[in-house]
Image (cartoon, coloured by chain):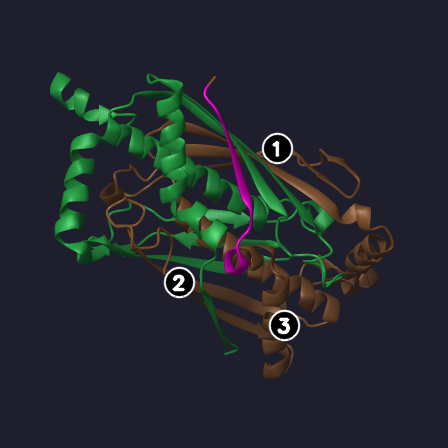
Chain colours: A green, B brown
Amino acid sequence: MSKVRSRIRNGVDSEQLFATLNIMKMEPDLAGFRFRALNRWIHGAHSRTTIREFYGAGEEDRSRPESFVLDSGEPTVLLGHDTGASPAEHLLHALAACLTTSVVYLAAARGVHLQEMESRLEADIDMRGALGLSENVPNGFRRIHLALTVKGEAPDVELRALVDRARERSVVYDMLSKAVPVVVEVSTE
Amino acid sequence: MSKVRSRIRNGVDSEQLFATLNIMKMEPDLAGFRFRALNRWIHGAHSRTTIREFYGAGEEDRSRPESFVLDSGEPTVLLGHDTGASPAEHLLHALAACLTTSVVYLAAARGVHLQEMESRLEADIDMRGALGLSENVPNGFRRIHLALTVKGEAPDVELRALVDRARERSVVYDMLSKAVPVVVEVSTE
């Protein structure tokens, strides 16, 4: 019991973590993942995404007991009915969750016990871009500001180093700060 | 009743839409929005974001009746416990929902009645990047493929034009395909 407990750091099984890293190092093909999502328009600004199966570690992964269901919407002032957070707000969640997970996994690998972590995000946008009222205004956020507070059993400098390394490794941070190719294929049947 | 009904196109109040566009054109300051999110780490790959108030149209908007709560996680093979879709999957949802909303609003503005829309997304990633096993592999998706099917009471060419215009205007598509500045501020207190 105590052996099992000591393997778990910050809720991450460090033995499984190192085993995963080793196997992907030895067999790079196992590091290839394909994620999927299906979004259906419901009404107005309301659309719903279901997410479940994916390909990874060399096989179709059907281990998730059920689909995740995510609803989107817009607030009243943006012509919606608050059927969910807006797509841009979901993006903020994706960014914060990804950075946080990266810090937690890195800390587990380095043997740092974390106590708390939270991120407050603010993002400014001029809606004239997205609403087609100006060609000179970007459609997206002007910038995203993320204030991350982390507490753990390590010196300040080590905690900051964890966050710095997490930024270098975060999947979502990487895509937002460097762009990612998006291919859109349209069918009208 | 029939007048009200005819104002509503695809679930969007077209009169309110044109009024919103007009007012933001006349008073550009009203187009400035600030969205916020608060993410808290829970355990392992599980973190939770709450989203509610924002600034927009010249004031703090407190009209949402409750907070939206979004949970993240990772699948077992990536050391999580499926406490939610992964951050990268949330990003796919944000992208699809944003493109869909953009098509719906544009169609409302152009008087096109839509019947159905769905998007299937697939995104490939080599996890060696995010796991720090290779410096030559990008951390994010190699690319995102989005297959969008739309049906509506308009010729094929008009429906395709709506999607093309939505891509030019989508907030999330814009940020993913062009990058966005992300400022991270760290505190260890």
- Reading the image, the residue beneath label 3 is B162
Instruction: Tell me the element at label 2.
Output: strand
Q: Position of residue B18 (x, y in %)?
A: 81, 60
Q: Magenta residues, as a range?
A: B176-188
Q: Position of residue A69 (x, y in %)?
A: 44, 48
Name the image quarter holding residue A32.
bottom left
Q: Tell me if A22 is positioned left or right of B73 in this view.
A: left
Give me the residue at 18% from left, 25% from top.
A7
- Reading the image, the residue beneath label 1 is B66
Residue A157's place in the image compared with A171, above or below, is: above
Amino acid at pointer 2: Arg
Give me the residue at 34% from left, 35% from top.
B45
- State how far apart marks 2 and 1 are (Cα): 35 Å
Q: Is residue B187 magenta?
A: yes
Instruction: Tell me the element at label 1.
Output: loop
Amino acid at pointer 3: Leu
Q: Is residue A103 magenta?
A: no
Q: Chain of mark 2?
A: B
Q: Tell me if B39 is positioned left or right of B81 in this view.
A: right
Q: Which mark, residue B143?
A: 2
For the residue pair B11 and B134, the one nearer the viewer reads as B134
Residue that protrudes farthest toward the right in the picture = B26
